[in-house]
Amino acid sequence: GENVEQHPSTLSVQEGDSAVIKCTYSDSASNYFPWYKQELGKRPQLIIDIRSNVGEKKDQRIAVTLNKTAKHFSLHITETQPEDSAVYFCAARSSGGSQGNLIFGKGTKLSVKP
Amino acid sequence: DGGITQSPKYLFRKEGQNVTLSCEQNLNHDAMYWYRQDPGQGLRLIYYSQIVNDFQKGDIAEGYSVSREKKESFPLTVTSAQKNPTAFYLCASSGTGGITEAFFGQGTRLTVV
């Protein structure tokens, strides 16, 4: 089945700096890669996603890149703000035999220091 | 709020008891999921269902059971066979037949007392 590895597990940056979180996946049939943000005590919420037919997607300060050949994708947050502090999860969904199976990484706790 | 509701928010279980966590969605989503969240472990898939009356085991299904008798509902039973059930449980739903966003419920925190 699919396996998603996420790094780093914790990340601390100064306000205004950029943050990058990286994920790798194992199932070459995976074709959908969402990123979720979970604030303390709250449910995870989608912040950006990318399909396998796209290499990069941007939404204001957030961007995601996908390298299908290497089977890795990354989240980039620019001009970080204290409200970006949260746990971020990457995920992958397969289009193959386990279609619909949404597998998550272990999360990255991002701390943005004012 | 988000169209997917979990209840209760907090649940206490005595050792040896089965408990059932509720998950209901009004988003007309075909797919539903149950995840367990432990500190430092991320979201681990327990069970998922892509259609009524069908469901598949995830990575940590032992000690859990589910049913999918209605499209809107996907209850999770934590049985006495689950040796370490204390955790935060999240239910999610998404569309199928395309690649769509998964929406999460607000979660149920289960504690064994």
Image (cartoon, rainbow, N blue to C red):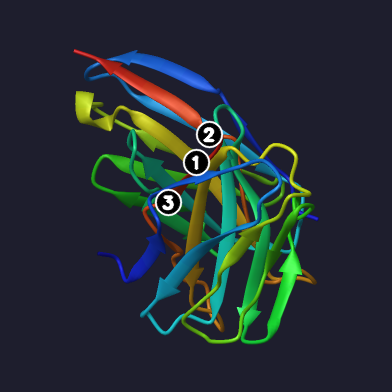
- Mark 1–mark 2 CB contact (< 8 Å): yes
**Residue A107: mark:** 2
Which residue in the structure is indicated by mark 3? B107
Give the image location of residue B85, x and y in percent: 64, 41
Mark 3 is on which residue type? Answer: Gly
Q: Left or right: where does residue A101 sit relative to residue A77?
A: right
Q: Is label 2 in a helix, a strand or a loop?
A: loop
Question: A57 above or below B28?
Answer: above
Q: Residue A8 occupies which quadrant of the picture?
A: top right
Q: Give, as a three-letter code, the residue at label 1.
A: Phe
Few, some or many residues within 10 Å of mark 1 (<14, 14–19, 20+): many
- Relative depth, front residue between A46 and A57: A46
Determine the chain carrying the residue at label 3. Answer: B
Q: Is residue B59 above or below residue A95?
A: above
Task: Give the structural element (helix, strand or loop) at label 3.
Answer: loop
User: x and y percent of residue A49 in the render?
Assistant: 44, 56
Mark 2 Cα-neighbour bin, 10 Å: few <14, some 14–19, many ≥20: many
Q: Tag 1's secondary structure?
A: strand
Q: Are marks 3 and 1 on the same chain?
A: no
